[in-house]
Image (cartoon, helix red, strand yellow):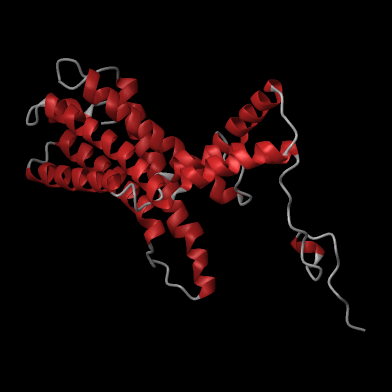
């Protein structure tokens, strides 16, 4: 199963041209949805205005410093999700992030270059597709059932859903249903295979259609925001607020809480 290209098997009932057109439409939805989200929230306008003000107020940075900041941003904030202090959440996020990248890239490669049983492509490519989907499931379900349930401390139910959960829920649905569909197809399950193919396509389409309303587009904002944060720190325009005077040392402040005698 883990070395079988599921899209090659699908070509017996769905034309490769239709599969490729579907991928193109999903790509357009991501681009259009991200632009719509940017325009609606005016985030791009704010970003560039803030960038101009920071450059004017701060000391000029050389090209070497800017390259160093870019490398730091890629290595720490993007590649290793250094903004997460909680190690469990960081690992769950990295599993989901790299799993999503593998899942999407291998899907596109198999659909465009190896869409038929006559050319199913290398077994490693199919294995990476399964691995990506499994990583998404591992990171996503771990976050949902072992990390996110901490909201119970605030009196919220475990399965409470808000709009911010839309992206992770649809991504988990897409990856999970995709794995089930691929397994049923390999097992020759007939009608069940068709049913789960429909559910897989429904969840995947919803994932890309809802870009303007979910946190999907945040993956494009975060690297730029992290880069600007480092630039502001380097040129002296970033100022952190002082810690509250009554915050105990164990919570990160250098001041002691008042003592009662």
As drawn, is 79 to the left or to the right of 246? left
Looking at the image, how many numbered discs can be counted on the residues? Answer: 0
Q: Tell me residue 245's x, y (percent).
A: 81, 68
Q: 246 above or below 261?
A: above
Q: 252 above or below 257?
A: above
Q: Tell me residue 99's x, y (percent).
A: 41, 37
- Which is more toward the observer, 133 or 251? 251
As drawn, is 125 to the left or to the right of 225? left
As drawn, is 13 to the left or to the right of 75? left
What is the quadrant of the C terminus in the image? bottom right
- Figure quadrant of residue 118: top left
- Which is more toward the observer, 97 or 234? 234
Residue displayed at 14% across by 30% down: 10
- Which is more toward the observer, 30 or 169? 30
Q: Tell me residue 48's x, y (percent).
A: 53, 40
Taking the image as drawn, is residue 95 in sight? no
**For the view shown, which residue lies furthest in the right direction?**
261
Q: Tell me residue 169's x, y (percent).
A: 34, 53
Residue displayed at 81% across by 63% down: 249
What is the quadrant of the N terminus in the image? top left
Taking the image as drawn, is residue 10 in sight? yes
Residue displayed at 62% across by 35% down: 76
Residue displayed at 25% across by 48% down: 206
- Figure quadrant of residue 61: top right
């Amino acid at each position: 199963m883990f070395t079988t290209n599921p899209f090659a098997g699908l070509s017996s009932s769905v034309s490769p041209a239709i599969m490729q057109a579907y991928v193109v439409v999903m790509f357009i939805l991501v681009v259009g949805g991200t632009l719509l989200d940017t325009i609606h929230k005016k985030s791009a306008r704010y970003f560039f205005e803030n960038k101009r003000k920071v450059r004017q107020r701060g000391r000029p940075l050389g090209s070497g410093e800017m390259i160093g900041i870019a490398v730091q941003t890629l290595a720490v904030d993007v590649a290793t999700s250094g903004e997460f202090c909680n190690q469990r959440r960081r690992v769950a996020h990295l599993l989901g992030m790299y799993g999503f990248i593998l899942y999407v890239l291998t899907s596109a490669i198999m659909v465009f270059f190896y869409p038929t049983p006559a050319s199913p492509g290398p077994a490693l490519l199919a294995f990476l597709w399964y691995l990506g989907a499994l990583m998404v499931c591992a990171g996503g379900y771990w976050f949902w059932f072992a990390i996110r349930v901490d909201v119970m401390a605030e009196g919220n139910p475990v399965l409470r859903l808000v709009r911010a959960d839309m992206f992770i829920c649809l991504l988990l649905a897409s990856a999970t249903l995709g794995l089930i569909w691929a397994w049923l197809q390999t097992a020759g399950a007939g009608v069940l295979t068709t049913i789960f193919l429909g559910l897989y396509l429904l969840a995947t389409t919803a994932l890309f259609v809802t870009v303007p309303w979910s946190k999907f587009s945040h993956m494009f904002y975060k690297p730029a925001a992290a880069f600007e944060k480092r630039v502001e720190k380097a040129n002296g325009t970033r100022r952190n607020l002082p810690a509250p005077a009554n915050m105990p040392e164990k919570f990160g402040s250098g001041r002691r809480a008042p003592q009662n005698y």
